[in-house]
Image (cartoon, rainbow, N blue to C red):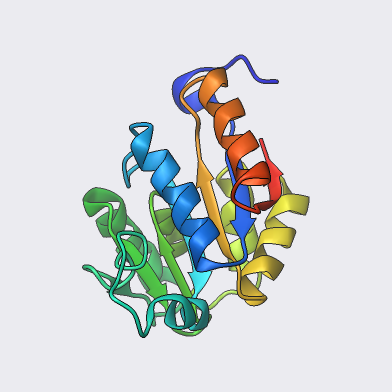
Amino acid sequence: MSTATGTDRGWLTGSFGDRESSEAAYQDLKNRGYSDDDINVMMSDETRGKWYGKDEPTELGSKAPEGAVTGGVIGGALGAVAAGIAAIGTNLVLPGLGLIVWGPIAAALAGAGAGGATGGIIGALVGYGIPEEHARLYEEDVKNGRAVMGVRPRNDEDAEYFENNWRNNYRGEHVYR
């Protein structure tokens, strides 16, 4: 287990196969004092539509459309979008990939040129400190209709708390720290 603190601390990541479990994991993070600037979420546009398209949006479900930046541009121009995303902490919609991302990792994906580059999602995740074997699982999870969530826990107590809840209470899969 890492003894690092602050931004040196590793990621806790996991994927969730339904709206209820992803909402519960997200709300658990919020209840423990984590903000949207701390929480990364990725899901396909199709998944977002299935989970949130017909019902009243919840806090998690409303994140994608609020101030979303559409990343239909390919290559270097996406890198320019990254600075704006990082500065305002908004969301990124990548229609070419059918991907919705919010949280700090949105800038990493935009900077990686994920809108037009094969392997952009995996590369951005790896660049953000997620081991490649986990990044590959998460890419598949998103393609298969799951939501992927990640956070840098502030301390070991939070890391253990979230890891246990995600696995045991919220049906999280591929939960790693």
Residue 11 versus residue 9 in the image, above or below: below
Residue 99, x across and y down, in percent: 49, 74
In front of the other: 166 or 101? 166
Looking at the rendering, in which quadrant would you find the C terminus?
top right
- Seen at 60% across and 44% down, the residue is 166
Residue 14, x across and y down, in percent: 62, 50
- Seen at 50% across and 30% down, the residue is 153
In front of the other: 160 or 21? 21
Q: Is residue 130 visible?
A: no
Check the image and name the residue furthest to the right.
133
Residue 176 versus residue 1 in the image, above or below: below
Looking at the rendering, in which quadrant would you find the N terminus?
top right
Q: Is residue 78 visible?
A: yes
Residue 84, picture quadrant: bottom left
In front of the other: 110 or 56? 56
Residue 129, picture quadrant: top right
Q: Is residue 137 left or right of residue 70?
A: right
Residue 124, x across and y down, in percent: 56, 56
Residue 109 versus residue 28 in the image, above or below: below
Task: Report how many numbered discs are placed on residues in the image.
Answer: 0
Residue 164, x across and y down, in percent: 64, 35
- Seen at 67% across and 67% down, the residue is 141
Check the image and name the residue furthest to the top.
3
